Image (tube, rainbow, N blue to C red):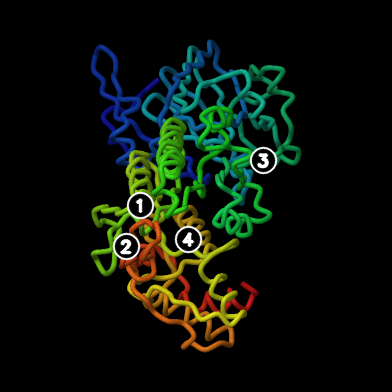
Amino acid sequence: MSIEFSKQLKAHDTPIPGVVLYDLPVHGDNRGWFKENWQREKMVALGLPDFRPVQNNISFNEKAGTTRGIHAEPWDKFISVATGRIFGAWVDLREGPSFGAVFTAELDPSQAIFIPRGVGNAFQTLEDNTAYTYLVNDHWSADAQGQYTFLNLADETAGIQWPIPLEQAELSDKDKAHPRLGDVTPMPPKKILVLGANGQLGKALRRLYEGDTSVEFAGRDAIDLTAEDSLTNVNWKNYATVVNAAAYTAVDTAETPDGRSSAWNVNVTAVARLARIAVDHDLTLVQVSSDYVFDGSEKTHAEDEALSPLGVYGQTKAAGDAVVTVVPKHYIVRTSWVIGDGNNFVRTMSSLASRGVRPAVVDDQFGRLTFTADIASGIRHLLETRPSYGVYNLTNDGPEQSWANIAADVYELSGSSRDDVTGVSTEEYFAGKSASPRPRNSGLALAKIKASGFAPVPSRERLVAYLKDGA
C-alpha cells in the first residue's frame, strides 16, 4: 500500500448532503507513518459539524473482499482507515429529496469521511488485515439497533459497482437479507419538541405546525418542567430542538410570597434543568424572553443591552435568560405585550367597548403588541434558516404606542369612539393596588431579526385581523 504523505487537510463535498470526504495529513519516514486522525479544532474550522463524539469503534477484517453494510445508524460517524484500504459506499436513507443518493470512494489511511445520522454506510476491504474505524456521537446499545435503517448491498437502484463481485465476497447472512430500496422505510429526522404546548404560544405553534409529524407537543400534563422525574423520563435522543413555551407570567402575583416561589421555580429552576439536558444531548434550545428584563430607561432596547429587571417576574426571566446562554445552541426570543388565545388586553378592551364602558388606561408605558402567530412564525424562521445563535428581539412592527393609544385603536375598530378611552399615569392607575413595577419603555429593536430575513408584520395589521376574527 502506498500512502501519499504530507497532504494538506482538505474537505471535499459529495452528492449526499452532509457527507464530506477529508484528506488527512499523514507524516511518514523510514519508520512508518503518523497522522492526526481527528483534531476537533482543525475539523470544526474546516466546516465539520462539532458533533461531539463519545465512542470509538474498530472493525478489523482479515481478508480482502470482506463486505459489510449497508447500515444507517441513528448517530453521526467520522470514519477512517487505520490500516489497509477499502472501497466505501454510502447511500442516503433519510427522509427527504436526497433519499437514495449514492457516493462511493476508495479510502486509505490518508482519508476520512463524515457520515450524518441516517446515511447508510458500507465498505469492502481491498487488502488483507484492514482496520476500519468509527468515531461516533452516541453510545452503542442493543436498544439502538431497533432504530437502524438497512439497505441490501446488491440493491439494483443504488447500483453500487463493487470491485470484488458480491458473489465472491465475504458477507454475513444478515447483510444478505436486507431489503431493496423500494422496501426501505426512510429514517425520519430528529424532532422538535414544544413544551408548554397548551399555553398561548403553544397553541399558536400547534396551528403553525399542524400536520407536521416532525414536531411534537407536550403540555404540563405530559411533561412538567417543575418535576425533575418528568424530564428524566423523556428519551431526549429523539429530539434535535426543544422550544420552551412554558413560563410563569402572573406579573403582579409574582410579588407575593407564594408567587415569588412559583415564578423562580418555573422561570429559573426548571429552565436550568432544561438547559442541562440541552447541553448533555446537544439540543438546540429556544427560550422565550420578555421586555420585563429591562427597567425601561432606554427608549428602545437592543439585544445586547445589559439586563436591569425591576420586579420579581422580570428578575426570573432575566435569570432564565442567563442560564440559557450556557447552552451552545440557543435562541432567546425576546418579546413584549403578547396577544393570543385566552384573556388578554385586546380582548378586555373589545369587551368593554361592546358594553359601552369608558375605561381609564395607562398612557405612559410604551411598546408594541406581539401576536403569538408572529412569535411562532419567527421561531420557525430561526429554526429553518439557522442564523447565529443568541438573542433575537421579536415583536410586531410599526410605531411604539401607549396602552391607552392601543385601547383607543381597539375601540375605534370595534365601532366605538376613541374618546371613550381616558389616559392616566401608571401611578394613578395603580394607586392603592399591589402591583409589580413595570418598564415605561418596552420597545424592542428589530434590526437583528430583520437582518436574518424575517419581516415582522405591523401590529396594526394584526390587530385589525384579530378583532375581525372575533377577539
| Mark 4 crowd level (few <14, some 14–19, many ≥20, 10 Å Cα) | many
| Mark 2 crowd level (few <14, some 14–19, many ≥20, 10 Å Cα) | many
Q: Amino acid at mark 2?
A: Pro
The secondary element bearing badge 3 is classed as loop
Residue nearest the viewer, comparing 431 with 451:
431
Q: Nearer the viewer, mark 3 or mark 1?
A: 1
Q: CA distance from mark 2 to mark 1?
A: 10 Å
- Disc 1 designates what residue? 314
- Disc 4 designates what residue? 378
Q: Tag on residue 439?
A: 2
Residue nearest the viewer, comparing 349 with 206:
349
Residue 399 sits above or below residue 426 on the image:
below
* Quadrant (top left, top right, bottom left, bottom right) of the N terminus: top left
Residue 6: percent from left, percent from top: 26, 30
Q: CA distance from mark 4 to mark 1?
A: 22 Å
Residue 217 sits above or below residue 230 on the image:
below
Q: CA distance from mark 3 to mark 1?
A: 45 Å
Residue 75: percent from left, percent from top: 53, 31
Of callouts 4 and 1, the N-terminal one: 1
Horizontal side of residue 305 vs 425, given as left or right: left
Q: Are marks 4 and 1 in contact (CB under 8 Å)?
A: no
The secondary element bearing badge 2 is classed as loop
| Mark 1 crowd level (few <14, some 14–19, many ≥20, 10 Å Cα) | many
